[in-house]
Every structure is written in structure tokens, then in C-alpha cells.
Amino acid sequence: MIEYLRNNADTVWLALQEHVWLALLPVLFGFVIALPVGYLGVRFPVLYHPLVNTCGVLYSIPSLALFVFLPVVLGTKVLSPVNIVVALTIYTVALLARTVADGLRSVDPVVVQAATAMGYRRVRRLTGVELPMALPVILAGLRVATVSNISLVSVGALIGIGGLGQLFTRGFQLFYIEPILVGIVLSVLLAGLADLIIVLVQRAVTPWTRAV
Amino acid sequence: MNLSYLLDPAHWELGAPYSIPTLILAHLGYTVLALLIGTVVALPVGLYIGHTGRGSFLAINAGNAGRSLPTLGLLMLLVTLLGLGLLPVLIALTVLVIPPILTSTYAGMRSLDHRVVDAARGMGMRSWQVLTRVELPMALPVLMGGFRSAALQVVATATVAAAVGLSGLGRLLIDGLAVNDYSRVLAGAIVVAVLAVLVDLFLALVQRWIVSPGLKGIE
């Protein structure tokens, strides 16, 4: 493995870089989209169940199907990384919109009433009280989305773009185990690192959860 | 959106090789086998950890560790080591379903009201009876939640079997892509998504049937 890494450092490094941004851009986009969508599910309770069901169906579409199907819908080239980013953004939204809604619903109504009584209006109450209180749940969802995105990117290798996944297809075609092992180890390490970073951020931004 | 492949009756002929029903059967076959083996492995371990409280670290972290393992990579590694065939696909899919089942079994056992378990002990139930008559039935709603998400994941992921030459609905995706037949790819995507929804509905019914009526309020 070390030998393979030494001889192919450039290829592996490029694949790793591609993997990082293919996995993390969708997390960013998905998070930004999921916040308002999840909020709508709480603000208008009629929308909650349709939201949960839609998310469930979206999440059940196999990634490979979405990767090959998106070019037809978006008019992009099959080899365009846009397909991967859009597909993973859809999964992230499907996962996080529900988590955001559940997180906001989990906020103790007494706290919300107290904030209202103190003169907080809707927007400030949302940004100053409800969202921070919902953060532990939302960030737990973000961890799941980030880790599964990092592992899903490699499926893109079947259509020619997939960061570390390209090491899998290369090893598979050559019947050569080293690149596959390197790809798996790096992918798992990357997921672990991203997970750890979110946990550390969570500790920093929700100090009250440790006080209890 | 070209639905011609999906709607062509010739592709729905029963028993014909590569017809949609044949592929669905193969797909369901991989799914059921992986879920079965995964449950046989993960359920006892989860119950043991939940019952005794030993090794909870394993149960808590199995979920995230499992999710971070790229199934495609694992599958290709196994094929390279073991050769083509059903075995590598089954192992890869089983590895995929073990973490959610293990984690949810443990979470289900931990979510129990301790007073109920104490009451069962106080009534003279043996450890084994507490486990099978009290803890397991009461953990079922959470456990089934994990089982359903595991089932969804396998149905979606079993498509990669086609990447190493096996059958299943992934054939429509891989072959369609290889010959630039997007109508076929679309058919594959739709059938897998519908199959996933149907499997989940079926398991929801099973859950209703096996969960004790006394727990319906808690769920």
C-alpha cells in the first residue's frame, strides 16, 4: 500500500482533492436549502408529513440511478461533475430538511413561549432561540449527511467521475488490490476527519448541552 | 423523459432473461439474503449489548463507521480477492446492513423504561425471559425503524451488483449507460425507487402486525 502511494502520489492526491469537493459542496448547498425547507415544515404543520414522505422517497432513489439520470434532466454532459454535486445535494436536502424540521419541533414549547413573552418576534425568536436550541439535532443530521456523502461520491466512478472511487474502478479493471485498499482507507479516514470536525464545532457552538 | 423502455410489454415478459420482472426478482433475492444474514449476525449482538450493557461503545460507533465504508470499494476489493460471483456481493451488502440493525437494536433496548425491566425481574422472570418477553418486544418499534432503513439502503445499493457482472436492477442502469440508452436507464431508476417505496410499505405493515398493541402509543 505504502509502495503504491509512493509511486502514484499525484494520482491519489488529485483523486482525494476531487473527492473532498465533490462530497462537501453538496453538504454546503444542501444545508442552505434544507434550513428554509425544514422551517416551512414546522411553520405550516400541514406540510410536515408531505415533507417527510417526499424526503423518504428522494432518499430511496439509488445514487447510481440519479448519477446517470440527471444529465438527461439537466442537459449536462454525462461526465460533468455537476451531476454528482446536484445528486448529492438532493440526498443532503432529503436528509437534512427532515432533521431541521424535527430539530425545531423538539424545542421545548415553554422556552419558545418564554422568548415570545420577552418580546422576541418571529424572526429573532427563530434565529436567536429556536435554531440554536435545535442545533444538536441538526448537527447530528449533518454528520450523517456528510459521512454518507463522502462514501457515496465513489459510486460516481462507475460513470467516470468519483474522486477516490476511480481508484476502485482502476484496481478492479487491473485486478490489482492496492489502489482499492488505498481508496477505501482514504475514504474512511476522510469521513472520520469530517465527522470529528463537526463534533468539535458542535461542542464549541452548543456549550449548554454539556452543562446538564 | 422517455418512458418507452419501461412501458414496452416485451420488457415485462415473465421469466425471460433480463426482463424487468426477472431483474426485480434477482434484486429482491440479494436484498432478502443480505437482510437475513445481517439480522442473524447483528440482532443477537445488539441484544447482548443492550441486555448486558457490555460493549456499548461498539454499538454506538458501528453506525457511523459502517456508513463511512464505501460499498463500491468494498465490493470491488472482495471481487478482486474472491473472484466474480454471488459471495462478494452478499458480503458487501451484509456489511452494509449490519450497522443500522446493530445500532437500532441497541438503541431500542436502551430506550426502555428501566422500571419495566425491574418489574419483570421482581416478578421472578429469568434473564432470558426478561430479554425475550419484555425487552425485545418493547424494543421492536425502534429496532424495526433501523431494519427499515437498512432495507432501503440495500434495495438502493444492490444496483452496484451489476457493476461486477451480476444481475439485479443495476443491469438496466449499467447496460443502458453502456449503450447510451437513456430510456433504459430511466426505467431502472424508476423501478428501483418504486421497489424501495413498496418494500418500506410492506415492512411498515409487518411492523404494525408484530408490535404489541400496548406499545402503539409510545411509538
Image (spheres, coloured by chain):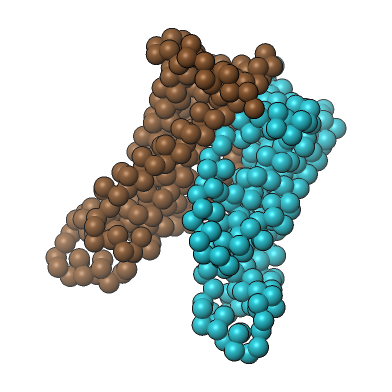
Q: Residue furthest left?
A: B124
Q: Quadrant of the C terminus of chain B?
A: bottom left
Q: Residue furthest right?
A: A10
- Residue A67 lies left or right of residue A62; in this view the side is right
The residue that appears at 52% across and 20% down in the rendered structure is B7
Chain in brown in the render: B
Image: B28 above or below A127: above
- Residue A70 lies left or right of residue B111; in this view the side is right
From the top left corner, tell me how far across and down residue B105 is, in percent: 38, 52
From the top left corner, tell me how far across and down residue B205 is, in percent: 32, 44
- Residue B169 lies left or right of residue B45; in this view the side is right
Chain in cyan in the render: A
Q: Quadrant of residue B119?
A: bottom left
Q: Is B143 in front, or is A68?
A: A68
The residue that appears at 42% across and 44% down in the rendered structure is B148
From the top left corner, tell me how far across and down residue B50 is, in percent: 36, 57
From the top left corner, tell me how far across and down residue A102 is, in percent: 53, 63
Q: Is B21 in front, or is A155?
A: B21
The residue that appears at 38% across and 63% down in the rendered structure is B111
Q: Residue furthest bottom?
A: A118
Q: Is B173 in front, or is A18?
A: B173
The residue that appears at 51% across and 77% down in the rendered structure is A108
Q: Quadrant of the N terminus of chain B?
A: top right
Q: Is A49 in front, or is A208?
A: A49
